[in-house]
Image (cartoon, rainbow, N blue to C red):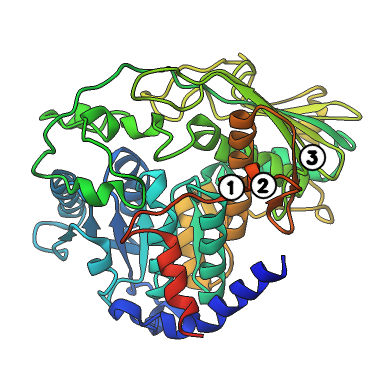
Amino acid sequence: MDEKKTSRRQFLKGSVSAATVAGFPALVPARVFSRPGPNDMIQVAQIGCGRIARHSEIKGMLDHSDLARVVAVCDLDAVRAADAKRLVESAYAQKFGAGKYAAVKTYGDYREMLQDKSIDAVCISTPDHWHAQPAMEAALAGKDIYLQKPASLTIKEGRQMADTVTHTGRIFQQGSQQRSEFNFRYACELVRNGRIGKVQQILIGLPADPAGNVEPEMPVPRNLNYEMWLGSTPLAYYTEKRVHPQRPDLKTRYGRPGWLRCEQFGAGMITGWGAHHIDIAHWGMGTEHTGPVEIVANAEFPKKGLWDVHGPFHVRAHYANGADVFISDKYPTGVKFIGEYGWIWVTRGAQVTPSDPAVVSSGSPALDASDRKMLAAGIKPDEIHLHHSPQNDHHLDWLASIRTRRQPAAPVEVGHRSCTACLLAHTAMKLDRTLKWDPQAERYINDEEANATLSRFQRAPYGTDRVWARGSSKS
């Protein structure tokens, strides 16, 4: 514990000078810290231009072109970078007229892009194993950050990222957009204000991924920097279903990517959907800066084939407040808070995107309760009111926070703690036994086998450890 605190202090002490590493600017444009006028645009760059970027982050920025402009896009797949440039420029041409917008720059390496001092903020929509490192480097470069969930591949790199972002003072929004949706906020406000009494149980329903086949080795497409795409994870032969579709048709080119089902790059649905619903459970309980103290789980894992993330599963996470959180693919997708006096249920539907696996549907409304009078009563002025995103829009909430420098709906510590609970569940699935967790020390209690899962070997020259070490060396 003392060693962990010391190393963290050493890094934070050195982070200011570390901000100039690799040519990153230490200063942030004054217009970001001030309250910009209506003609001052937040200059945004997009890192990762795949399925989620097109439907979420790029769209979110285009929807708010009165506040922000996408000025650069970056992807390790040159086809995707070119597609993103066309998407943005086509939207701006339609909205503002041909020639009345700046050309969008394209990059194949985000580290080069981060050296552009005119860029104020970045949206990161990369695969899970490429979340924490670019977020840390963006923070050190003086950029505000919108990061798709989950926060990190491992708990250690999530902590490194959270501390880096906190110390540099960047505005960070985790892509936990349910926090900006009315149904979820209202459900959590009702629970936090005691409408169902003391929370006893929370039931979370998530989907499970099917297994796949053994896939043949294939030539690496000329448009893809596959070595960098693998990043800090081990070298592995290229096959299309390990990465993302390479298709001539635009629609099928952005289908659900295969990396989502490879443990090399993520943990499967427990972090994919789990990062959303576990975050809501934390928000409703007020445990968003801590985590469970005991966790046990079981799961089925494929015995062969390329895709090896968990299939059907069941998790029980016990919290210090006495509540048990049960997570399973057998429950309807959503979150059900059960207390002394009744229950409150909230969901956003059966699928995030049409290409996600089918999940169990409850058939009930998006917001429901054991006594629907609870839902009609509202929240009194003197009761707990949770963060209200403007227009219930998660991207707008982030842009507003960049202007005001106040924390958004899903700041970095919240994102890290939600992801941590997901990764604890994944470790419990793998070890198939009860684990004790210390949320303050962020270590398993008297269990070195479990503690070995807090980090992974990081292949040079990539990884958060190297970014962290650069900061520590400046102290």
- Disc 1 crowd, CA 10 A, few/some/many (<14, 14-19, 20+): few
Q: Amino acid at mark 2?
A: Glu
Q: Are marks 3 and 2 in contact (CB under 8 Å)?
A: no
What distance separates the C-alpha of mark 3 from that of mark 1?
36 Å
Disc 2 and disc 1 in contact, CB within 8 angstroms: yes
263 relative to 146, above or below: above
Amino acid carrying label 3: it is: Val
**Pointer 1 residue:** 452
Distance from the alpha carbon under mark 2 to that under mark 1: 6 Å
Q: Secondary structure at mark 1?
A: helix
Q: Nearer the viewer, residue 367 or 299?
A: 299
Q: Is the residue marked by circle 2 packed among few (<14), some (14-19), or many (20+) residues within 10 Å?
A: few
Name the outermost residue toward the front: 448
Q: Which mark is residue 289?
A: none
Residue at 50% x, 45% y: name it. 150
Dot 3 or dot 1, earlier in sequence: 3
Give the residue number, with chain letter if any, for mark 3. 191
Q: Amino acid at mark 1?
A: Ala
Residue 221 sits in quarter: top left
The residue closer to the viewer here, 317 or 441, is 441
In the structure shown, which secondary structural element does the residue marked by tag 3 occupy? helix
User: In the rendering, at what x and y percent does residue 292 appear?
Assistant: 74, 43
